[in-house]
């Protein structure tokens, strides 16, 4: 992802009834306080934002004839110097009867991809070249973040009852012929396949209906294509048929969406009336927000059904502000974005048309264009295409959109906010973005409480659009500890970018699926077993029965600082009196938190009064009949949707600290001894190795050890220099294996990383890449190897060696093998492993004698690579076992 790519450059760059959005009018009398926390995030899509976009219908159809205008549009809407949109909703036109001439707009007469004559259908892949021209250029401008969704307003005219693609003779009735649902689905899928297979357009999602349950779509309309689909059976059939057609074309991985109703409230009823098969078929709810108000209800419906949620279309001619002039349309847009994103937790926000008006003295296809908008009033779109002057005219509404789209980027985690602010957090890059507007005519103070972040920077960068400013970098604002106090000028929109990192609850602890255990689920259903409590999805859940429990073995000892839980939706009350307990050995347990109130369906984070050292953690419910006023069940049932754990690895309690016998590294800056590689191992985090480009520092442990964890402390004030740095290990100092790469900017504290699996190593090296960083946080011209301190944890392996000669006896009668080997001094167990499918796989590990016989009836002629290891003082010497492995062929 291009998260915060060229961020420094960005700081320097200078027809339908639309329900009014609630907004906050700031005054200068009292500062509004907005608390932002990395622990209080959106719930839709696990809080991950997917991006900003626009439909290409119809403006791309109008200007795509011109390569110049098409490229300008791609640059100003999707390019790095423009809005940096990354979602395009591409319209698959149905195509109207060629004899019709009723659509009078210059942009909305969308071509279809087929020609129909005497019952014969042929595809014309030269159709819709204008919209395609803009799409291809926009994909190029957006880069890796681009998401393409295909959608339709109407089937081809010959599939409709009215014979017209703009709607039915009765705008309240279905227009697709009853026997043509599968035909329309195949048409839609065929176009999708051609774009992806022949033109290389990766399609993320698809939707065959647009505002289906309305009375907008009437035959011979002057405006556009459209098709009514009744709620329930009609919409369900369309979705299911599209699923079949997409699968038939090998595109079953494309996300199907539904149902793009014009109103939020209508979207709720349309989804609720879908068949079970249709609900299962769609992976995301797409809605328009031209009407309705039940955003929170729609969000909850999406969550309870395990669906993502997009705000897939809106715009309007609304205004806001106080005598705001050109800013009035811009402030209306800011209000609308804030309301939609915050109240719905929408993971994407997509404008209807970024260009809705065109200037051309000649018009287009015999129709007249509308001309320039009055920027002092409200208007649709954020820009105007001037065909006569061959340029895109940008308005204040465009710059308002950019205050959000340029800084809140795909992949960021959306933070719950309040009032007039939209906020997001990039945990990988360690940055907080908050966008706030002020519709008052005078300045207003705003305070951001960032106390829940482990670290924040000392300054915030501010970028503003106002009456006389467009994305102006207005400088930096000093923070007071973890508080940002700022002033919003009247009728303005300001974006604040702040360095911020981590939660005061610590880092999330990764729990491996094979380290989970628990009681049985209801009817022993694998779809609701204890694994669901740690699968990262709030829509799934552990449906444990009476006195049930779910337990995680963390694999090492951690200092647990916080935990979080999400109840099973509609069964939240079952968590009351449930409790969390911890243990060092899995036997002796200590209770650390009991749920005393009825929780809501959301993640609830509990910060412990002080860190608790533990390896095992368990959530359980009491036995017997519930003893609270919330739960009226006959027995306590262990129901939980999700559990998360936070803390830091305690390497001293988990492993042995591995002391280097020798260290080495590249030269320091100006070859100063006070900053050489030895400083990374002197036990003092105040000193540091100040290595230059492509530098490295290395430890020689003196012998091959088992490495489990690495601890590192960045040079304070230069934490960004560690991003993309990596740790590699070697047994011989020649062949190296990378075991960890630093993907996010660390805090200035010591970071401890537990490896996914133990590795054998004698040499451990920390290094940085060559060349110029391109990670969004390190602005140096070259990577510099800066590190304050390093430490390594694992186990010192015994020197037990299996004899080089392993005696092998074959039985041709039984097709089996007997291995005999010399006794190893001090060994209490032996194990035997076979190398299969690229991995050593243990066959037996409780052998007390020095002989092992394989099972009978192994495959004759097959060759196996075999290793035998000894356990001495409780430690397995696998390194020497593999070194002295051999091969046998079954006879």
Image: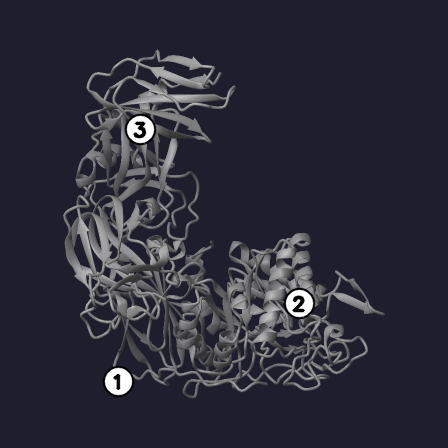
Q: Position of residue 697 (x, y in %)?
A: 30, 33
Near-viewer residue (261 or 354): 261
Whether residue 14 is visible = no
**How far across and down, in percent of the image, does residue 363 sit?**
73, 78
Residue 29 got which mark?
A: 1
Q: Is residue 209 above or below residue 324?
A: above
Q: How is the image coloured?
A: one colour
Which circle's residue, 3 or 1, is located before the other in the chain? 1
Q: Which residue is mark 2?
A: 92
**Point 33% across, 50% down: residue:** 745
SS of the residue under disc 3: strand
For image coordinates 67% across by 72% down, the residue present is: 389
Give the CA separation, mark 3 to mark 1. 64 Å
Q: Which residue is mark 3?
A: 761
* Quadrant of the rendered image containing residue 262: bottom right
Front tag of 3 and 1 = 3
Q: Is residue 60 above or below residue 873?
A: below
Q: Are marks 3 and 1 in contact (CB under 8 Å)?
A: no
The answer for how far apart the CA atoms under marks 2 and 3 are is: 57 Å
- The numbered mark at residue 694 is none
Residue 740 at what x, y percent from top left? 35, 40
């Amino acid at each position: 992802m291009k998260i915060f790519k060229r961020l420094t450059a960005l700081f320097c760059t200078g027809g339908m009834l639309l329900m009014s959005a609630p907004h906050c009018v700031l005054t200068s009398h009292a500062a509004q306080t907005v608390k932002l926390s990395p622990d209080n995030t959106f719930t839709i899509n696990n809080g991950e934002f997917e991006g900003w976009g626009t439909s290409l219908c119809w403006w791309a159809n109008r200007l795509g004839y011109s390569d110049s205008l098409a490229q300008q549009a791609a640059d100003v809407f999707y390019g790095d110097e423009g809005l940096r949109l990354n979602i395009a909703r591409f319209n698959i036109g149905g195509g109207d009867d060629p004899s019709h001439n009723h659509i009078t707009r210059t942009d909305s007469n969308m071509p279809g991809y087929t020609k129909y004559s005497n019952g014969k259908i042929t595809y014309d892949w030269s159709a819709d070249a204008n919209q395609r021209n803009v799409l291809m250029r926009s994909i190029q401008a957006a880069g890796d973040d681009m998401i393409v969704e295909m959608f339709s307003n109407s089937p081809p005219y010959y599939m409709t009852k009215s014979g017209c693609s703009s709607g039915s003779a009765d705008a309240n009735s279905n227009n697709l012929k009853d026997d043509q649902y599968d035909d329309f689905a195949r048409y839609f899928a065929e176009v999708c396949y051609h774009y992806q297979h022949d033109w290389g357009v990766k399609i993320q999602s698809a939707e065959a209906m647009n505002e289906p349950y309305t009375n907008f779509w009437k035959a011979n309309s002057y405006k556009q294509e459209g098709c009514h689909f009744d709620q329930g059976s009609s919409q369900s059939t369309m979705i299911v048929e599209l699923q079949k057609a997409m699968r038939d074309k090998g595109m079953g991985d494309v996300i199907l969406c539904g149902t793009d109703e014009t109103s939020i409230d209508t979207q709720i009823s349309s989804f609720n009336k879908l068949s079970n098969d249709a609900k299962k078929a769609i992976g995301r709810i797409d809605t328009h927000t031209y009407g309705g108000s039940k955003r929170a209800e729609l969000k909850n419906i999406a969550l309870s059904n395990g669906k993502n949620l997009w705000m897939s279309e809106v715009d309007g001619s609304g205004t806001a502000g106080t005598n705001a002039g050109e800013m009035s349309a811009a402030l209306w847009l800011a209000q609308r974005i804030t309301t939609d994103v915050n109240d719905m937790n929408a993971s994407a926000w997509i404008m209807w048309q970024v260009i809705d008006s065109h200037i051309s003295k000649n018009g287009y296809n015999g129709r007249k264009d509308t001309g320039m908008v009055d920027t002092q009033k409200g208007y649709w779109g954020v820009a105007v295409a001037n065909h006569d002057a061959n340029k895109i005219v940008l308005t204040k509404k465009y710059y308002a959109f950019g205050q959000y789209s340029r800084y809140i980027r795909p992949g960021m985690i959306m933070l719950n906010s309040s009032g007039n602010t939209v906020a997001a957090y990039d945990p990988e890059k360690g940055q907080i973005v908050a966008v706030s507007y002020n519709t008052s005519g005078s300045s207003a103070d705003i305070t951001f409480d960032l106390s829940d972040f482990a670290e924040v920077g000392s300054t915030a960068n501010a970028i503003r659009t106002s009456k006389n400013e467009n994305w102006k970098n207005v400088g930096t604002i000093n923070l007071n500890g973890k508080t940002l106090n700022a002033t919003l000028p009247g009728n303005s929109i300001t974006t604040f970018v702040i360095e911020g990192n981590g939660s005061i609850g610590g880092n999330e602890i990764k729990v491996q699926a094979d380290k989970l255990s628990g009681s049985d689920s209801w009817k022993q259903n694998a779809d609701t077993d204890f694994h669901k409590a740690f699968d990262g999805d709030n829509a799934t859940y552990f449906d444990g029965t009476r006195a049930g429990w779910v337990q995680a073995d963390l694999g090492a000892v951690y200092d647990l600082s916080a935990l979080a839980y999400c109840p099973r939706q509609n069964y939240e009350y079952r968590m009351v009196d449930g409790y969390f307990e911890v243990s060092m050995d899995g036997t002796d347990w200590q209770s650390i938190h009991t749920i005393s109130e009825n929780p809501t369906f959301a993640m609830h984070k509990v910060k412990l009064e002080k860190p608790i050292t533990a390896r095992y953690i368990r959530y359980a419910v009491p036995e017997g009949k519930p003893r609270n006023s919330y739960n009226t069940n006959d027995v306590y049932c262990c129901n939980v949707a999700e559990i998360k754990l936070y803390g830091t690895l305690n390497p001293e309690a988990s492993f042995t600290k591995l002391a280097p016998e020798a260290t080495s590294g590249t030269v320091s800056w100006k070859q100063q001894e006070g900053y050489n590689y030895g400083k990374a191992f002197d036990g003092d985090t105040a000193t540091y190795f100040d290595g230059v480009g492509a530098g490295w520092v290395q430890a020689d442990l003196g012998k091959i050890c088992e490495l489990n964890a690495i601890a590192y402390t960045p040079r304070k004030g230069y934490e960004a220099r560690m991003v993309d740095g990596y740790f590699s290990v070697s047994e011989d100092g020649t062949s190296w294996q990378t075991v960890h790469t630093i993907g996010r900017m660390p805090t200035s504290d010591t970071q401890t990383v537990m490896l996914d699996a133990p590795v054998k190593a004698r040499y451990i090296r920390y290094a940085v890449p060559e060349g110029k960083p391109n990670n969004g946080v390190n602005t140096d011209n070259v990577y510099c190897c800066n590190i304050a301190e390093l430490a390594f944890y694992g186990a010192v392996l015994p020197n037990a060696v299996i004899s080089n000669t392993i005696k092998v006896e074959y039985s041709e009668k039984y097709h089996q093998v007997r291995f005999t080997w010399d006794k190893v001094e001090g060994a209490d167990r032996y194990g035997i492993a076979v190398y299969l499918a690229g991995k050593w796989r243990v066959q037996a590990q409780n052998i007390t004698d020095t002989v092992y016989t394989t099972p009978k009836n192994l495959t004759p002629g097959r060759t196996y690579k075999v290793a035998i290891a000894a356990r001495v003082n409780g430690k397995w010497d696998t390194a020497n076992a593999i070194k002295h492995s051999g091969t046998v062929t079954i006879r």
